[in-house]
Image (spheres, rainbow, N blue to C red):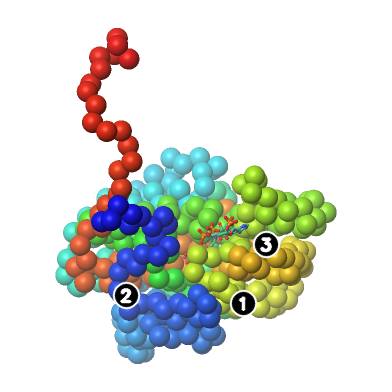
Amino acid sequence: TNGVITIDPGFKNTGSCESAITFLDGEKGILRYRGYPIEQLAEKADFLEVAYALIFGNLPTTEQLETFRSDIKKQSVVDDDIKKILDAFPKSAHPMGVLSSLTSALTAFNSSSVNVDSEEEMYRAITKIMGKFPVLVAWTMRKKQGLPLNYGSNSLGYVENIMKMMFEQPNETYEVNPVIKDALDKLLILHADHEQNCSTSTVRIAGSSHVGLFSSLSTGISALWGPLHGGANQAVLEMLEAIKADGGDTKKYMAKAKDKSDPFRLMGFGHRVYKNFDPRAKIIKKAADEVLNDLGVEDPILEIAKGLEQEALNDKYFVDRKLYPNVDFYSGIIYRAMGIPVDMFTVMFALGRLPGWIAQWREMRLKKEPIGRPRQIYIGENERDFVSIDKR
Ligand code: SDX
């Protein structure tokens, strides 16, 4: 501090706003959306209900949910020219980079969603992105798989529709697999919001300049892509695959994770706020067993993950630093069992986090929060005169 400004790297001890959306207690491992415990939501609600509660404040009545659903359905077509942008990407492009570009590009086809100031204009922009984002997610995956870019069906529910767009095979009638539908509902609910995490803070600060919702969301997708944040779910699977290829030598990776000279971290472990078990990880770990069992999928990676967890929970380095499995540790095992490619895992995180980002952006705009503009402590050169290049 310089007596006036206090520097707080990573904002570990800085509150950026007051919010009524999500409550979490890192010591007790508590997570609630609008006061509803996620354990109950994950068991009893569906994703669109939870999205409604996050964005508008309460679990919806039947009528409110039906109105929301039908307003979204009216907005679930994407301008076909978006395909030209998608075509420009090489198949090797990472889906998160594609998705953030397409999300920002939506602004070009929906100019009315840029300067939204009234609640009505916000609502229209919200239903637009809730309808169009799943299309972008599905098309991003199918483009890489060389599959036709398709639509779902408005006769299906929100998550079933996403499944049809993602998994439908040409020449086959798509059947919704109830095991996958339930697991996807649960995973999307568990990823839906998490107060002022890195990507949500990014959406808030971008949105505080009053750039439109789609552009603000695009910045959140980029922040989420980082391996320290949502990108960890992909990094976990790659790490577990490497351990498997190394004959299951978890001790080698534990040693690397503890070696300060080695940049390697045990991916899917640790959390800025949870200094106890991430409550989402508990639910996802249980769901992983159930889903793989119900799908009849044997995945040795799950046993390696459990072995790694056990070792870390008994290792002084991890215990001293209160490093426990987080939301990203087991989720990829379920996504893989669903047939989702590993480089799409963080896209699935973004699909779940969409309503949370929207809710936080809406709260920030409705509260008319000032533009985010932190200060600094200058530690550079004192004043000095220009020197011509021949004298440098
Ligand atoms: C998400 O914020 C959110 O809510 C995020 C999220 C959400 O829903 O939005 O919950 C989603 O991003 C979950 C986190 C996914 N990331 C990973 O799994 C990547 C691995 N985890 C770490 O990089 C780390 O734990 C963070 C980024 C999650 C948290 O980092 P912090 O709070 O800045 O902690 P830190 O880096 O200061 O670490 C404290 C100590 C350090 O050791 P010392 O310097 O004290 O000796 O713990 C060590 C770190 O080196 N450490 C790890 C570790 N995580 C922290 N050592 C090895 N492996 C790890 N995973």
Nearer to me, 173 or 382: 382
Rendered location of residue 176, percent (x, y): 57, 74
Query: Label 3: few (<14), some or many (≥20) within 10 Å?
Result: some
Q: CA distance from mark 1 to mark 3?
A: 21 Å
Q: CA distance from mark 1 to mark 2?
A: 26 Å
Q: CA distance from mark 3 to mark 2?
A: 34 Å
Residue 81 x, y percent position in the rendering: 34, 48
Give the residue at x 32% y 15%.
392
Q: Which comes sooner in the sequence, label 1 or label 2? A: 2
Image quarter of the N terminus? bottom left
Residue at disc 3, CB closer than 8 Å to ligand 1: yes
User: Taking 132 as reference, is 145 above or below it?
Assistant: above
Q: Quadrant of residue 68?
A: bottom left
Residue type (three-letter) at the residue carrying disc 2: Ser
**Which residue has dot 2 on it?**
19
Q: Which mark is residue 317?
A: 3
